[in-house]
Image (tube, helix red, strand yellow):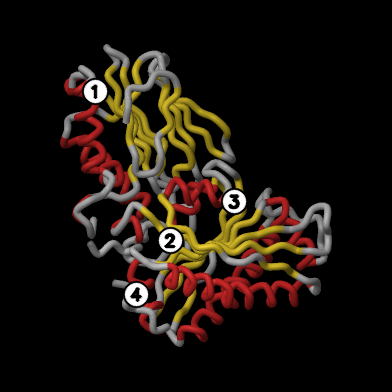
Amino acid sequence: MSKVLGAVKVGIADLNVVEHPGSISTIGLGSCVGVVIYDEQIRIAGLVHVMLPDSSIAKTEDFKQGKFADTGIATLIEMMLQKNAKKSRMKAKIAGGAQMFTNQSGKDTIRIGPRNIDAVKEVLTEHNIPLLAEDVGGNKGRTIEFSTESLLLKVRTIQQGEQFI
Amino acid sequence: MNHPFDYTAIHKDVLKEIANIGAGNAATSLSEMLNQPVHMKTPVVHVVSFDEMMERAGGKEEVQAAIHVELQGRLKGSMFFVIDPAEAEEFVGLLTGNKNLSLIEGDSFAISAFMELGNILTGSYVRALSDFTNLEIHQSVPSVAIDMLGAMLTAGLIEISQVSDHAIMIETVFSDETSEKNPLQGHFILLPDPEAFQQIFEVLGVADHE
């Protein structure tokens, strides 16, 4: 989680921040949701790769903050504030939350993608961060990259190629 | 600290042996289906972060064909059979005798044939696992996807990720030896749920790992 310019890659259950003119990306979102939060004025953006809806289901005390929607988004906001972003200027774009397989039946795994989407939206609302764009649901994997230059989120899928939201 | 993966070499060996028996049985089934020898590599057991797991399996963005089943009953977890889409198509061609079916383009007959292949392979693996551990294990109906590996494999991490930032990945690679220049290759990835390990170690008499 260092200060990096250029292209920052975020792993699973991880989070990071990039400054202008860099971009930030995460690869292969399935049921996970990639949440991008940015401050248009000072052009910094953060991304968290959320795996699970809520930290209340964590069975350990020690976990990667980025894993859950609530802790991940809160930690990302904190990191951005430390880089002089203003919460009142923050906006969000999200992608992911698919259901890759149709056979999943366990009670926790069922609909994990849609549950992640709902949780992310709820947490963003709690923080009063407007959600400007989304590409969520379905049954496709997504790779996303946000540019602090264009403020667009590039979403790549196998079937549909690239689109910008 | 009661770390879920605080195991010794013996425990890893037990998991390898389980994979050996399970995948061995699946390899036999595959060999019978294809009517040609199938080679199985020694299983490997990795304790890995989620990102490392995707790298080991071939890379998050790598497009692969995967069959996913959930293990249910006394041993829970996820199992994947992962194969290059073009190779999956070759398998489908060998199985159906029809080389013109396109799995990648979503031909429904090709998908059912691939799903059936998956059903037989995972079924043989699970049956051997169940016999060896004497635990009652069933598998869900299989489901097929052709997409980015990272997006697909996270479906097997939902349970474990509530307990840990790491997973135990039990991997076995298969290949079809006959065509030397371009052997068919597929791998099995078994991701037991956290409580499954204790279950396995208890029934096999290596539970105490203090």
Badge 2 is on which residue? B168
Q: Amino acid at mark 1?
A: Met
> From this viewpoint, is residue B109 visible?
yes
Q: Could you say where residue B11 lies in the image, as x and y percent from the top left?
A: 42, 71
- The amino acid type of the residue labelled 3 equals Ile
Q: Amino acid at mark 4?
A: Gln
Q: How far is the residue under mark 3 from the one under mark 1?
A: 36 Å
Give the quarter of the image for residue B204: bottom left
Local secondary structure at mark 2 = strand
Quadrant including the N terminus of chain B: bottom left
Task: Have a look at marks 2 and 1 and say if they share a chain.
Answer: no
Q: In the image, residue B76 lies at what x, y percent? A: 40, 72
Crowdedness near tag 2: few (<14), some (14–19) or many (≥20) residues, C-alpha within 10 Å:
many
Q: Which residue is mark 3?
A: B146
The answer to whether mark 3 and mark 1 are in CB contact below 8 A is no
Between A141 and B178, the one lying in front of the other is B178
Secondary structure at badge 3 equals strand
Say whether residue A165 is visible.
no
Q: Is the same chain shared between marks 4 and 1?
A: no
Using the image, name the chain to which the residue with label 3 belongs: B
Disc 4: which chain? B
Labels 4 & 1 near each other (Cβ < 8 A): no
**CA–CA distance in space, label 2 to label 1:** 38 Å
Tell me which chain the residue with mark 2 is part of: B
Q: Which residue is mark 4?
A: B198
For label 1, the residue is A90
Q: Are marks 2 and 4 on the same chain?
A: yes
Q: Nearer the viewer, mark 2 or mark 1?
A: 2
